[in-house]
Image (cartoon, rainbow, N blue to C red):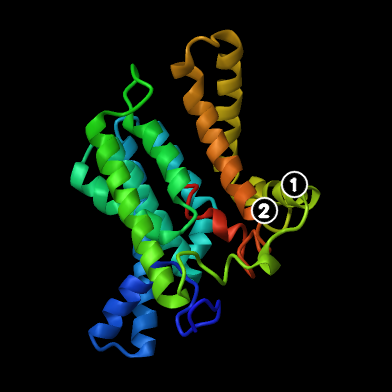
Amino acid sequence: DSGSPHTGVFHYPLLQYLPASLAILLGASDAAALGFLARLNVLAFGGCLTLIWLALRQRPRLAALGVVAVLASAATYQSTSAFGEMFAAFVILGAVVSIRARRTLLIVALTALACMAKETVPPFLVVLGLLVGRDEKRLLPSRRLLSAMFAGITLGVLCNFGFNQFRFGTFSNLLLTQPMFRTPGWRLRFEILAGEWFSTVGGLVWFWPIATLVLASCATIGLKRLLLTPRQPLDWIPPIAVTTIGLGYTFGLANWFAPFGWTAYGHRLAVPLLPA
């Protein structure tokens, strides 16, 4: 029914429906379609490792650190146990790498797909794009890169709106935005945020230690530069922005009733963004 959170099309992101629909259009059975999605998930995991290495190959130690950071995380488990998170991680990382490589057409296509991967991704993708698209002497990327990036993000958001209109009769994802799924009270939200990082059940400190160390290092470097050279924003804004993305994303998840991603090994919902 229009305007109802319960319809014949589930609440999952649009990007998950695209390969599934392709398999069905090609005549695959339910079992064959599931097998196709499982293989695609493994390929997405390998694609993430490849993209990190290619993006950082001029600094081999940093490239190796990036690869190991993904291997030593919940992403390795998700590559063989689910579909949506790893595929989302691949397209979001691909969008960031395309911006870094200044490939205009790829930027438009991959930023659009990245926004379809998770409806909450666009604001974080904007910040990541602004960071990796600039050069060392400018705070913002060129107009050409900005135009391509925002064109892709706008296209992805509009596709999400259209898909929600098709299945819910409104622009928002009615099922996931119901009040019953929101965390009540600020105190509980901050408790969940602390649990997302330090809980022994699924905290990022234990399940993604290298990424946690990278973010902590960024915070330390950024604050140190801010104190020493406050009038040189090009020095301290990037590391602080990276830290803010990590904290902001997990705080957003803390506002939801299942911040780790329902029944999951480790912090499943952190998998899509942290590789990027």
- Say if residue 67 shows up in the picture: no
Give how far across and how far down residue 229 sits, in percent: 54, 9
Give how far across and how far down residue 41 sits, in percent: 39, 67
Residue drawn where x is 59% and y is 43% of the image: 248
State whether residue 159 is above or below residue 4. above
**Residue 172 disc label:** none
Total numbered labels placed on residues in the image: 2
SS class, disc 1: helix
Residue matched to label 1: 190
**CB under 8 Å between discs 2 and 1:** yes
Question: Counting residues from the N terminus, which is met first, the one under dot 2 or under dot 1?
Answer: 1
Residue matched to label 2: 254
Residue drawn where x is 29% and y is 50% of the image: 152
Identified by mark 2, the residue type is Ala
SS class, disc 2: helix
- Residue 226: name its quadrant: top right
Residue drawn where x is 56% and y is 22% of the image: 222
State whether residue 127 is above or below residue 114. above
Identified by mark 1, the residue type is Phe
Crowd tier of the residue under label 1, counting other residues whose Cα lies within 10 Å: few below 14, some 14–19, many 20 or above = some
State whether residue 203 is above or below residue 180. above
Image quadrant containing the C terminus? top left
The residue sitting at the right extreme is: 187
Residue drawn where x is 25% and y is 31% of the image: 143
Crowd tier of the residue under label 2, counting other residues whose Cα lies within 10 Å: few below 14, some 14–19, many 20 or above = many
Left or right: 94 in relation to 257: left
Give how far across and how far down residue 177 sits, in percent: 59, 65
